[in-house]
Image: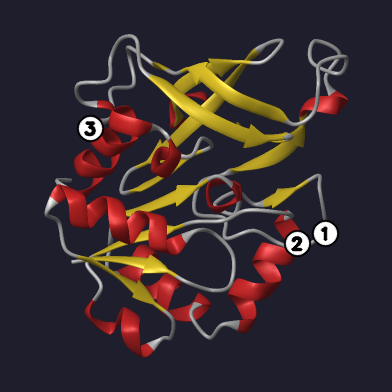
Amino acid sequence: MIHIVDYGVGNVQAFVNMYKRLGINAKRAVSAHDLLSAKKVILPGVGAFDHAMELLNASGMREPLDRLVLEQGAPVLGICVGMQMLADGSDEGSETGLGWVKGRVRSFASQAASAALPMPHMGWNDVIPVADSPSALFKGLESEARFYFLHSYYFEAAEAADAVALSDYGFEFACAVQRGHVAGVQFHPEKSHHWGAALLKNFAEL
């Protein structure tokens, strides 16, 4: 069973619907009690970093999630702002992130190579898995995979090896990170047709 954390942001139903089409059991988690039986967790997110962190911290699910991930080793997949929340913090705000993957979230506008480009980075873009950092998330997606993006900030991993897939918006940036059982993707698999379905299926099979 995959639990999708519903703390007030993110299109949770889209993930439930996609997993239903794939024949995979998935359900919302809206309380700490819901997470007691969780084996795998998806952390979605949209909007501003601080707002998302404040909602998660107020939901009563932050401590159970820390136990699941840090003590029990449950696989987790952060998506969009949910991926950014895995970091130590973000230049977008002042809240402390989850710190499950060391790094910081940076603004495209702060980088000379992307500052003149339209913000947010929106639409379809190629995603290239890093050859020497193979991730099971990208099984079958090693070439010609495209995903839908909508973001103005990107994850700058403290350890280069934690960047497991790259995309380009003025410069190459990590659009997916993974450290052990903790992973995150900046793009929206729930909006990315068969490529997104394949990635979500890969996560279910980890």
Q: Which mark is residue 136?
A: 3
Q: Position of residue 7 (x, y in %)?
A: 54, 74
Q: Is residue 152 above or below residue 84?
A: above
The amino acid marked with disc number 1 is Ser
For image coordinates 53% across by 37% down, the residue present is 186
- Label 1 or label 2, whichever lies nearer to me, is 2
Q: Disc 1 and disc 2: Cα gap in Å?
A: 7 Å
Q: Residues within 10 Å of mark 2 (few under 14, many from 20)?
A: some
Mark 1 highlights which residue? 94
The amino acid marked with disc number 3 is Ala
Q: Position of residue 77 (x, y in %)?
A: 39, 50
For image coordinates 43% across by 86% down, the residue present is 31
Q: Position of residue 119 (x, y in %)?
A: 80, 28
Mark 2 highlights which residue? 50
Q: Is residue 140 above or below residue 42?
A: above
Q: Disc 3 and disc 2: Cα gap in Å?
A: 30 Å
Q: Left of 102 or right of it: where is 182?
A: left
Give the quarter of the image for residue 121.
top right
Q: Position of residue 146 (x, y in %)?
A: 42, 19
The amino acid marked with disc number 2 is Asp
* First-in-chain label (3 vs 1): 1
For image coordinates 75% across by 31% down, the residue present is 120
Q: Are marks 1 and 2 in contact (CB under 8 Å)?
A: yes
